[in-house]
Amino acid sequence: MQAKKRYLLLGLSVGLLLLLYHVMSPSSPPADIPVLLLERGDETLFPSLRLSPQRSYVEAEDSRYDGDLHISARQRRAARVKSYTSKQCRMETCFDFSRCQSAAGFKVYVYPVDETEKISPIYEEILQALRNSRYYTSNSSEACLFFLAIDTLDRDKLSQNYVHDLGSKVTSLKLWNGGLNHIVFNLYAGTWPDYAEDDLGFDMGKAILAKASFSTSHYRQGFDISFPLFHKEHPFRGGEEGYLKSNNVPPTKPYTLVFKGKRYLTGIGSETRNSLYHIHNDQDIILLTTCRHGHGWQNVADERCEKDNFEYDK
Ligand SMILES: *[C@@H]1O[C@H](CO)[C@@H](O)[C@H](O)[C@H]1NC(C)=O
């Protein structure tokens, strides 16, 4: 925040100097005085600086930067350029279609599993499903799509399934090829309370992301895959018969909406879930939330927690 204020001050003083310069200079008629627009959140934070031939010391992005200031401005810019290029990925720019036109037809390749690497049971199931597919090939040279045998599902640093040094493990793969024609699965990214959606902790390059809880601001249209968030105990195949007996429209079910889960008292998503009790009516809309979450939830508990936890446990 300190740096942000300094940059803003700097920007303002440069702007004022320019204004003075324009007023004093006899060649410029008074009508030409540039108006200093200071619109926060606007891409053009200092439009008057754009007009001048001098290069601005502060970029619009810098004045908004709120993160770790131990990283130099140059590193920040480099990171931005990198994420910008992969953000632009589309099938036309980040995918090699020629790989999908082999005589073998459309084939998918799964990397061989390194026995020393831990893979969560749920990712093992995804890989198993791919290997059972009729599109599967063990011959990488005829493959169109590639799937990593390194578990990328859980990128929450606090999770026991978190894989360390993912970046170096991935780039050391001979077939990685900057992520070209790869599909990377992800269910969780970042950690509580800041679930950084775009932070998988490694450079995905040109890989396609199949991810749960995608937001429209990160989803690359026609390129990424929005993937359902499913439970660890989700059956691998089929499972028990469901309860749906008929497909009546409108449905004759007694419930319109049912939700049971954690409330998340603070952080991303908490605002929505903290409001759920408003629409709970104990008849056709049932919304049960618990305040219990990790350690120390009691410190942020509110007056509804006791009642909510009780209802949740019933
Ligand atoms: C793998 O596929 C390539 C291309 O179709 C083929 O030339 C090669 O013989 C295959 N290798 C094996 C071991 O089947």
Image (tube, rainbow, N blue to C red):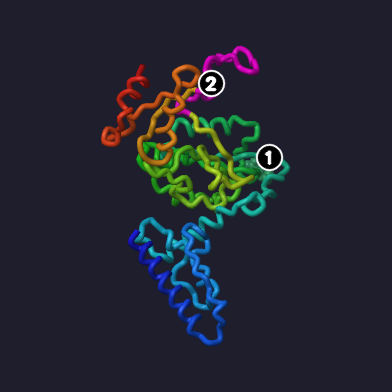
Disc number lying in front (1 or 2): 2
Check the picture and name the quadrant holding the C terminus: top left
Q: Position of residue 208 (x, y in %)?
A: 57, 46
Residue topped by disc 2: 256
Check the picture and name the quadrant holding the N terminus: bottom left
Q: Residue at x 29, y 36 (%)?
A: 300
Q: How many marks?
A: 2
Mark seen at residue 106: 1
Q: Nearer the viewer, residue 3 or 233?
A: 3
| Vertical relation: 41 (above or below) 248 | below
Residue 13 occupies which quadrant of the picture? bottom left
Q: Residue at x 47, y 64 (%)?
A: 38
**Residue range (magenta):** 231-257
Amino acid carrying mark 2 in the image: Thr
Magenta span: helix, strand or loop, mainly?
A: loop
**Residue 298 relative to residue 38: left or right:** left
How far apart in space, not on screen, are marks 1 and 2 (Cα)? 42 Å
Q: Residue at x 30, y 29 (%)?
A: 303
Tell me the element at label 1. Answer: loop
